[in-house]
Amino acid sequence: MKANEAGPSTAKPQPIKTSINLPPEAVEALRAIAEDRGTTVADVIRRAIWVEKYLHDATRKGGKLLIEDEKQRLKELVIR
């Protein structure tokens, strides 16, 4: 490789700042989750997006979402 040729980029993509409007109950829920986990509201939102993406992809491929309750009964979670 020549000195003036660019090699593979090692720079991380820069985050994009966004703004959303949420009802007070949603903000309070985010704050409660963040406090419980010892993290930030922004981190809770980022994680929620990735979980939503995972669930979306899994169900689009024909997968089912099952939740085990406290009595060890399985229930299917349907997201529309």
Image (tube, rainbow, N blue to C red):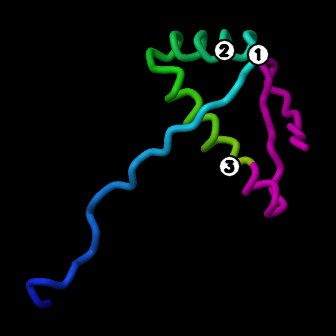
- Under tag 3, what secondary structure? helix
Tell me, yes or no, whether the highlighted magenta stretch contains residue 74. Answer: yes
How many other residues sit within 10 Å of disc 3, few (<14), some (14-19) or many (≥20)?
A: few
**Quick one: which residue is furthest to the left in this view?**
3
Q: Residue at x 57, y 37 (%)?
A: 18
78 or 70, nearer to the observer: 78
Where is residue 49 drawn, in percent x and y? 63, 40
Picture quarter with the N terminus: bottom left
10 Å crowding of disc 1: few (<14), some (14-19), many (20+):
few
Q: Is residue 10 left or right of residue 27?
A: left
Question: What's the residue at 90%, 40% (across, down)?
Answer: 78
Query: Which label is found at residue 42?
Result: none
Please state which amino acid type lies under the numbered disc 1: Pro
The stretch in magenta equals: 56-80
Q: CA distance from mark 2 to mark 1?
A: 7 Å
Q: Where residue 23 is drawn, which disc sits there?
A: 1
Query: Which residue is at a point 86% across and 37% down the rendered structure image?
Result: 77
Mark 1 and mark 3 lie on one chain; the one further toward the N terminus is 1
| First along the sequence among labels 2 and 3 | 2
Where does the C terminus fall, quadrant-wise? top right
Q: Provide residue 63's location: percent of width, then percent of height.
A: 80, 56
**Identity, as a three-letter code, of the amino acid under mark 3:** Lys
In the picture, measured across the screen, residue 8 lies left or right of residue 28, that is left
Disc number lying in front (2 or 3): 2
Counting the numbered discs, the total is 3
**Is residue 49 one of those drawn in magenta?**
no
Write down the quadrant of residue 73 in the picture. Answer: top right
Image-based side of 30 in relation to 64, left or right:
left
Find the residue positioned furthest to the bottom.
Answer: 1
Q: Which residue lies under the disc numbered 2?
A: 27
